[in-house]
Amino acid sequence: MSLHEAPEYSDIKVFQVKGKHIVLGISGGIAAYKSAHLLRLLVKQGAEVQVVITPNGKEFITPVTLSSLSGKPVVSEFFTANTGEWHSHVDLGLWADLMVIAPATASTIAKMANGVADNMLVTTYLSAKEHVMVAPAMDLDMWAHPSTQRNVATLRADGVEIIEPAEGELASHLVGRGRMEEPENIVKRIREYFNRSESMTGLRVAITAGPTYERIDPVRFIGNYSSGKMGFALAEECSARGAEVTLIAGPVAIETRSPRIRRIDVESAQEMHNVALGEFAASDIGIFSAAVADYRPLKAESSKIKREHNDGMSIELVRNPDIAFDCTRSRRPGQVFVGFALETDDEMANAASKLERKGLDMIVLNSLRDKGAGFRTDTNKVTIVTATGEAAYPLKTKREVAADIVDAIENLMGARGESCGD
Ligand code: PMT
């Protein structure tokens, strides 16, 4: 197998901005003057744009300019003072196919990262169901400050797409990173997003996620450290690309964001197995990201095992079914199955052996030897292995890793001539 570069989004086939509902959030920075141009470009391409501006934003660009360009009244306050009319951030959040915040100041980024809902822009963000893009703009030291970088990392982990600021001369006349990306490039990212957002339309995806708990008695179980973050990120990514997603989740403490994800909660490996057989059979793409316990106690006690009755104890374990193996055994032509390999030693050899043994089309290898990879973290570092090669990726947020994995699945389907729903 040869090592090659991770692919980038490159083959953008159709540009679909026309008719899309976009909320353009504008916060109070000098780059707000560029938002008028961004708005004009989007409207020219047929998008319906609703501007939401912070009170400080209005100091930099007037609502009259923005409403003339968008053809809609600009929303800024929770209420219209003279009529008492309430502006519903919930309705706006539901209306939007995409929310773009450009420029996003350090303050707005901090509020978004921490849920400080004290203006219409942040409340709309908190109500947004669809994808959110943020184009930061600020002085170079503010951008580089650990506090800003922490907040940006939080937004990334929450699935927000950050359009990195460019380098150049800033409002302070200092030169460095902090300039809002040019409107033309933001529009390009928006087009790429909409193109991506429909790439899996019509496809059914089944995903296992999280740990399984194998009951010892009513208060104890055998489990593992999986939080479900990797599997949930995959579910969100597939849903964002238009797929019908069924997520079979072990016991985890996280919620799904997209209302389109059908979630089935299970506890044990046997329960996951029972649900998965039917769901994976009905899917076009199956992703096994769960950390399934390989063994369970032969007998689950119905009462709590008492400490004082036992000097020592041993639990007899029996093997759990291999969900991935059983699902791929009865595969239909055209189905694509992707497994994970969580390793501590001989990573590549173990991943390659699992690929073959479990009848998978792709294995996503993550190693506990890599800092920031594997269980519970918001980041992961993976190598995607197929029968024809492997691609190693740097450490990224789990949502970004999910995008890389889904890109790789789409490429594999494209190479086989199977429909990716375009
Ligand atoms: O949930 P997080 O905290 O975000 O952590 C993510 C993760 C580390 C759990 C995830 O990235 C990951 O590596 N998941 C697979 C973990 C694992 O169980 O690997 P494995 O090498 O033991 O299993 C290989 C493959 O077979 C996996 O796709 C697994 O889902 C599947 N399997 C394993 C055993 C079993 N009985 N049934 C299975 O389907």
Image: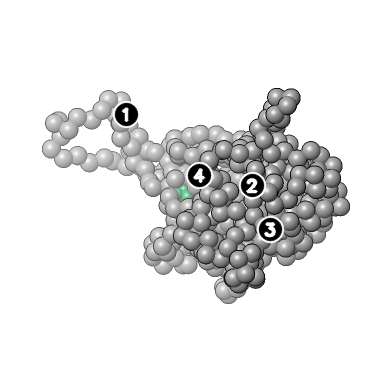
Front position among marks 4 and 2: 2
Front position among marks 1 and 2: 2
In the rendered image, which residue does mark 1 sit on? 218
Q: CA distance from mark 2 to mark 3?
A: 12 Å
Q: CA distance from mark 4 to mark 2?
A: 19 Å
Q: Position of residue 99 (x, y in %)?
A: 69, 46
**Pointers 1 and 4 in contact (CB under 8 A)?**
no
**Quick one: label 3, few (<14), some, or many (20+) residues within 10 Å?**
many
* Label whose residue precedes the other's in the sequence (1 or 4): 4
Q: Compared with residue 94, is residue 358 higher up or lower down, i.e. above or below?
A: below
Ligand 1 contact, mark 1 (Cβ < 8 Å)? no
Front position among marks 1 and 4: 4
Kind of residue at badge 3: Ala
In the rendered image, which residue does mark 2 sit on? 56
Q: CA distance from mark 3 to mark 4?
A: 23 Å
Q: CA distance from mark 1 to mark 4?
A: 37 Å
